[in-house]
Image: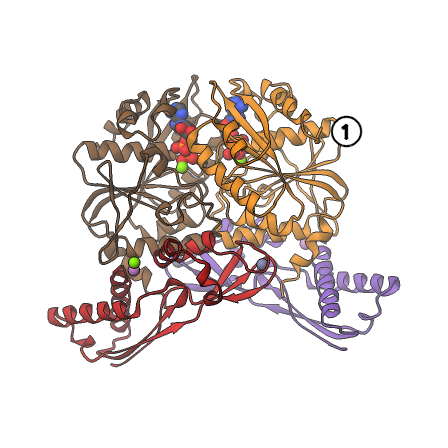
Chain colours: A orange, B purple, C brown, D red
């Protein structure tokens, strides 16, 4: 019998809300949105954790500009505070080496992380999801009960085709969907809004393509001052998060 | 001391399982600890003891006389590409202290730091001895 | 004993070159590049197959504008010709429904597809890879021996961090890398070129961000006339593909 | 008739394995076909026969007297979320012809068209009876 699954509920018991930033599609801004969301909530005085579940393309640590932080061992592992956020990522253990994990190993590593991480009391745990609807998505649904999905897309048909699949799956499973964010908007287009409507998912608004965003990567203070962060905050102010 | 978190997982699972099975007094639990994770058995046993003491003090007497048997399970890895099978211990000296510690926390870090000794592939399976496992629980209803 | 693995080599025996379009990162243009590459090679008179291995976010069929095509049963399954390309995708079997497969199931489905697909004689089989370096990547390496990787990135630090991992893994395993393509270039930047140099990977060139690309999605003839396709062809003319 | 491709895989594996094991004459092969994939046993057996005939004609006499035993293996699925286990056959009538055919070609299409009958989750495991499997090969060296 695997003893780890049993303790996960207890480890997450003092977390008020679990927010999974997801898409199904890659490269739509999940990591930028998850990290900026966590930073914004923390700035407002909330206790925030950030969990990077993209084990093969971890990005949140790059966006945060993580240096020399490492979890403390204390009846488990306690995530270090990075710019005010309790930050957990596989990078502490795999450094910047490739981690060629198969799905079954990804699943095992998630269970291990959830079983040993001591988040303590949190208002929000933001989860930066990988692309796909595989092991990470299924395990989040299985083990992180009560998670709410913040779904991201770009205006492109190709992206929407995949995002639609995640939305359909979540709806079928009756998982709460906070809504759909349309990111990297450059030109007028109503596809994303229409897709949301068709699936009865709240359309939360759009974030413009921000050509200066790249310069803020690795610098959280700068990041919070970008047009990207401002657009995101307008969207969040329409939710019950901020 | 992250062994504490795993010990807590074990006790919590033992308690819940015995409740489900309507066991009143648990006589013995057999735990296997996989060599790959390099659990410190002494710390682990100490943590189990402390957690049990606390629970007995609080409310739960079902654990009072529980014997704990811990067995270390040798770890084996098997390459999906060339089929070669090897024991973790035969290669573990090649790991640096940092690498060992990473595997201690997340055994899947093995896919970053270990390669098939025969064909150098990272595409192997951990066939035995990954981490903590409850082998059996004995008790009386 | 699983009989399927044994026959894969035979199924691929009459394919001259296997080209995997990959990145590790999502949303960098793998599917657009793979599909356009396949179309361009076919236009030049080569016999081309296209295999979409992104089971959770299949896109090539959207880009090709696939309608009503279905494999024929003939001592296995024979991919239909779509705009001159023998096209195989999981969409024939999962339609546009979400396919929540765990890694172990992805692997099983890949083995099944490879075991039963009759490609017949091909000059090129182009493989559109999913993001990540998990089951699909490991299975491609394991079963599609001799595959050459065409690796795609965007100019972003966040993308490069992940692309670097795929490149490092391929180099370590001595898998042939045709080179790195920098896609969606909008502003001057030398990060990708430097990354390629640092890892001794050929830098093949860049593809500009093409604001009209979206309009060509679903329309192969139009796609071949985009600036995107022209940029890609300049790059390919420097390889031994065209 | 995609059964042909799977039959070819079986024969090719039998031949290669016997060569490795230095078996000169193969007496019997036992094949399990998983119910989930709904292989047409008659077509499959016909394909096996044709492929063997062709090989015997060409060069390989080791297969000449091989007996083929085919056993259909019932398929079971187990939900990872609620633990419920069920048999494929008990639910298979809910599948449309198209859905069945998709599962016939790629059994993993099951994750698209089948749900746990108890909790409706798609997160289940195919514990038995997925597809074609070689159970045993007997022969003389
Ligand atoms: N609004 C935006 N404007 C400009 N670039 C963006 C925007 N959102 C995201 N990006 C860029 O797009 C790329 C993908 O973002 P990322 O957060 O890594 O996506 P994901 O996590 O979905 O893969 C990154 O290079 C990021 O800097
Ligand atoms: N050069 C380009 N100019 C403009 N848009 C592009 C370009 N390359 C790709 N895209 C767009 O970027 C998105 C991601 O491309 P896609 O091929 O789906 O990436 P991947 O397969 O790597 O996930 C799509 O919306 C696609 O239309
Ligand atoms: Mg990301
Ligand atoms: Mg330690
Ligand atoms: Mg793609
Ligand atoms: Mg049929
Ligand atoms: Ni420890
Ligand atoms: Ni068939
Ligand atoms: Zn090996
Ligand atoms: Zn269930």
Q: Is residue B46 above or below residue A212?
A: below
* Residue A96, percent from left and from top: 52, 39
D122 or A88: nearer the eye? D122
B63 or D40: nearer the eye? D40
D17 or C47: nearer the eye? C47
Quarter the C terminus of chain C occupies: top left
Q: Which residue is mark 1?
A: A45
* Residue C215, percent from left and from top: 36, 23
B93 or D17: nearer the eye? D17
Give the chain letter at badge 1. A
In the picture, measured across the screen, residue B45 lies left or right of residue C11, that is right
Farthest left residue in view: D57
* Residue A180, percent from left and from top: 57, 32
Residues packed near mark 1 inside 10 Å, few (<14), some (14 to 19) or many (20 plus): few
The quadrant where residue D31 appears: bottom left
Q: Secondary structure at mark 1?
A: loop
* Residue D57, percent from left and from top: 11, 71
Residue at position x 77%, y 63% from top? B46
Q: Is residue C6 above or below residue A178?
A: below
Residue at position x 47%, y 27% from top? A191
Residue at position x 51%, y 20% from top? A209
Q: Quadrant of ligand 7?
A: bottom right
Q: Is mark 1 within 8 Å of ligand 1?
A: no
């Amino acid at each position: 019998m695997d003893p780890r699954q049993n303790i996960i509920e207890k480890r997450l018991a003092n977390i008020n809300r679990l927010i999974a930033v997801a898409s199904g599609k890659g490269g739509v801004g999940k990591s930028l949105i998850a990290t900026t969301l966590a930073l914004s909530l923390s700035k407002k005085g909330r206790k925030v954790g950030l969990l990077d579940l993209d084990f093969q393309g971890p990005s949140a640590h790059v966006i945060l500009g993580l240096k020399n932080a490492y979890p403390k061992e204390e009846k488990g592992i306690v995530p270090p505070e990075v710019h005010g956020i309790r930050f957990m990522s596989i990078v502490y253990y795999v450094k910047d080496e490739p981690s060629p994990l198969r799905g079954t190993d990804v699943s095992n590593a998630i269970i291990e992380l959830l079983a040993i991480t001591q988040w303590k009391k949190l208002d929000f745990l933001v989860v930066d999801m990988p692309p796909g609807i595989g092991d990470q998505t299924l395990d989040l649904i299985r083990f992180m009960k009560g998670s709410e999905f913040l779904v991201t897309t770009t205006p492109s048909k190709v992206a929407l085709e995949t995002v639609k699949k995640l939305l359909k799956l979540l709806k079928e499973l009756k998982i709460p969907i906070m809504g759909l964010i349309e990111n990297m908007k450059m030109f007028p287009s109503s596809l994303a809004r229409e897709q949301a409507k068709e699936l009865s998912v709240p359309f939360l608004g759009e974030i413009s393509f921000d050509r200066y965003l790249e310069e803020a990567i690795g610098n959280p203070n700068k990041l919070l001052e970008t047009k990207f962060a401002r657009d995101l905050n307008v969207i969040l102010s329409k939710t019950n998060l901020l | 001391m992250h062994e504490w978190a795993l010990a807590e997982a074990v006790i919590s699972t033992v308690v819940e399982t015995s409740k489900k099975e309507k066991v009143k007094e648990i006589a013995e639990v057999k735990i296997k600890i996989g060599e790959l994770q390099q659990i410190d058995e002494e710390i682990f046993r100490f943590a189990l003891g402390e957690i049990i003491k606390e629970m007995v003090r609080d409310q739960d007497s079902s654990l009072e006389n529980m014997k704990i048997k811990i067995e270390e399970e040798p770890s084996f890895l098997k390459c999906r590409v060339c089929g070669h099978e090897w024991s973790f211990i035969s290669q573990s000296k090649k790991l640096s202290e940092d690498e060992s510690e990473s595997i201690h926390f997340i055994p899947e870090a093995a896919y970053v730091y270990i390669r098939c000794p025969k064909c150098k592939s990272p595409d192997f399976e951990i066939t035995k001895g990954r981490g903590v496992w409850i082998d059996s629980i004995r008790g009386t209803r």
